[in-house]
């Protein structure tokens, strides 16, 4: 019989699931679920049984028999090549385990990134279904949009901030229908239509904490909602948190015709600011439809020179474009940036607030309602099946004039 090798799971609660996968030598992974009955070692007092779906690397099906052995181990201390499936520092005796092999019903399809590189490093695979942990939801994905951070993570450009553990599942935006709720979740139920800023959205099922999800408002298509979480939260937080304009302030939004820029223009107008939409000359007509107080071609130096002095800039472009605008800011003017601190800005006395978008279910719900009411438009350029993720990322990188969505 092959000997079990248990990986320490870290401090946990008695009733929290443990994840176990059983691997066969030179064969496809097998997955088992079951229950481990336990007692406290010192007192022999029964503890809450542990339902598990935990990783356990073994070469054969003998894992079933191995799990049924009595294992007396102390947290974090190996014994006979084993480590405890731990519960804090409590010493446990594992008295019995029952296992049921998973079937095809317990796997889903997901797009997996196998290494840093081009789109050929994305592969459609079968992977284990996620489980709803305490305080979390599992959602059947209807729409998952592709964002610049996705291809930056894929290529390795963003590895300093967002390293990928391979094989990994990309994707920050997801929408769909709740299929499972974890313990303690009271604000959502199975069947609810939701959207959220998550991790691992390129998959048929997405698990994430309940507090990152928001219900999709009536009138908003469940698939189209998948285009929204990251751009809504980034654009809204760029204005409400990073720039934070007062009523009457003059605010320039760079890249205003992009998805994040559109949201920023809308959010700044809601704040009562006087908003200029900055775009390339080729997109002036498009920008004129955004409801801004003025439109300017940022690639036209003469037009930029005619801008009024600005209280702040909400920057979604960066580079030479933002540097060319420093002279248009009032003393102690503010730059809010989604791309990091612009070079030389602080040296000129400019106040800089750079940030990364954070989940905020209330804010997400508020701006999603504006989309549902057609007050705010986030264009969708193309919808493609999950299996076409390689092609979808290639298209999205060329900036097709709207979001590219993967369909569940």
Image (cartoon, grey):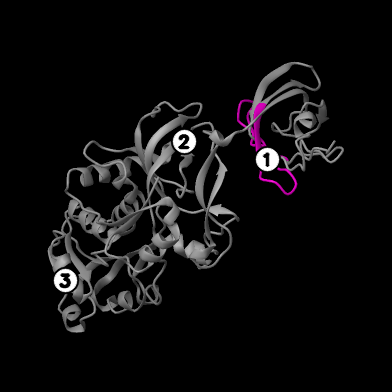
x then y, percent, for residue 192? 35, 31
Q: Which residues are magenta?
A: 8-34
Q: Earlier in the sequence, mark 2 or mark 1?
A: 1
Q: Separation of disc 3 and disc 1 at Cα?
A: 54 Å
| 37, 12: nearer the viewer | 37
| Mark found first going from the N terminus, 3 or 2 | 2
Q: Quadrant of residue 353?
A: bottom left
Disc 3 vs disc 1: Cβ atoms closer than 8 Å? no
Q: Is residue 24 magenta?
A: yes
Residue at x 47%, y 36% (from the top left corner):
138
The percent coordinates of residue 174 (x first, y second) are 39, 46
- Residue 403's spot in the image, x, y percent? 31, 57
Residue at 30%, 76% (x, y): give it: 321
Residue hosting label 3 = 284
Upstream in sequence: badge 3 or badge 1: 1
Residue 158, can we see it?
no
**Residue at label 1?**
55
Q: Which residue is mark 2?
A: 138
Mark 1, secondary structure of its residue = loop
- Name the one closer to the observer, 370 or 121: 121
Residue at image coords 36%, 65%:
395
Q: Residue furthest right?
A: 80
The CA distance from mark 2 to mark 1 is 19 Å
């Amino acid at each position: 019989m092959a000997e079990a090798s248990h990986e320490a799971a870290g401090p946990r609660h008695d009733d929290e699931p443990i994840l176990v996968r059983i691997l066969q030598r030179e064969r496809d992974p097998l997955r088992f679920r079951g229950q481990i009955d336990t007692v406290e070692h010192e007192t022999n007092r029964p503890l809450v049984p542990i339902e598990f779906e935990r990783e356990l690397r073994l070469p054969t099906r003998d894992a079933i028999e191995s799990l049924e052995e009595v294992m007396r181990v102390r947290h974090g201390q190996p014994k006979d090549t084993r480590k405890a499936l731990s519960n804090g520092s409590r010493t446990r005796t594992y008295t019995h385990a029952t296992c049921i092999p998973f079937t095809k019903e317990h796997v889903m399809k997901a797009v997996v990134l196998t290494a840093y590189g081009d789109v050929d490093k994305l592969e459609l695979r079968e992977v284990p279904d996620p489980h709803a942990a305490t305080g979390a939801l599992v959602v059947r994905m209807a729409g998952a949009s592709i964002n610049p951070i996705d291809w930056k993570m894929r290529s390795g450009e963003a590895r300093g901030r967002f390293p990928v553990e391979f094989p990994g599942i990309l994707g920050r935006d997801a929408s769909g229908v709740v299929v499972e709720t974890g313990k303690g979740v009271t604000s959502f139920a199975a069947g609810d239509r939701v959207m959220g800023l998550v991790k691992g959205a390129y998959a048929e099922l997405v698990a994430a904490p309940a507090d990152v999800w928001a219900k999709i408002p009536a009138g908003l298509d469940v698939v189209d909602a998948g285009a929204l979480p990251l751009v809504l939260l980034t654009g809204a937080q760029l204005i409400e948190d990073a720039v934070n304009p007062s009523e009457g302030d003059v605010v320039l939004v760079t890249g205003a015709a992009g998805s994040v820029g559109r949201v920023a223009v809308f959010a700044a107008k809601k704040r009562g600011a006087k908003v200029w939409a900055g775009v390339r000359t080729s997109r002036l007509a498009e920008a004129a439809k955004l409801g801004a107080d003025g439109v300017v071609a940022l690639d036209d130096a003469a037009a930029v020179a005619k801008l009024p002095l600005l209280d702040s800039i909400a920057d979604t472009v960066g580079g030479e474009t933002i540097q060319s605008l420093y002279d248009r800011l009032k003393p102690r003017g503010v730059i809010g940036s989604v791309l990091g601190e612009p070079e030389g800005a602080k040296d000129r006395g400019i106040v800089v607030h750079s940030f990364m978008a954070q989940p905020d279910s209330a804010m997400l719900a508020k701006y999603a309602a504006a989309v549902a009411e057609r007050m705010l438009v986030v264009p969708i350029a193309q919808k493609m099946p999950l299996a076409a993720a390689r092609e979808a990322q290639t298209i999205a990188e060329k900036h097709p004039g709207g979001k590219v969505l993967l369909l569940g």
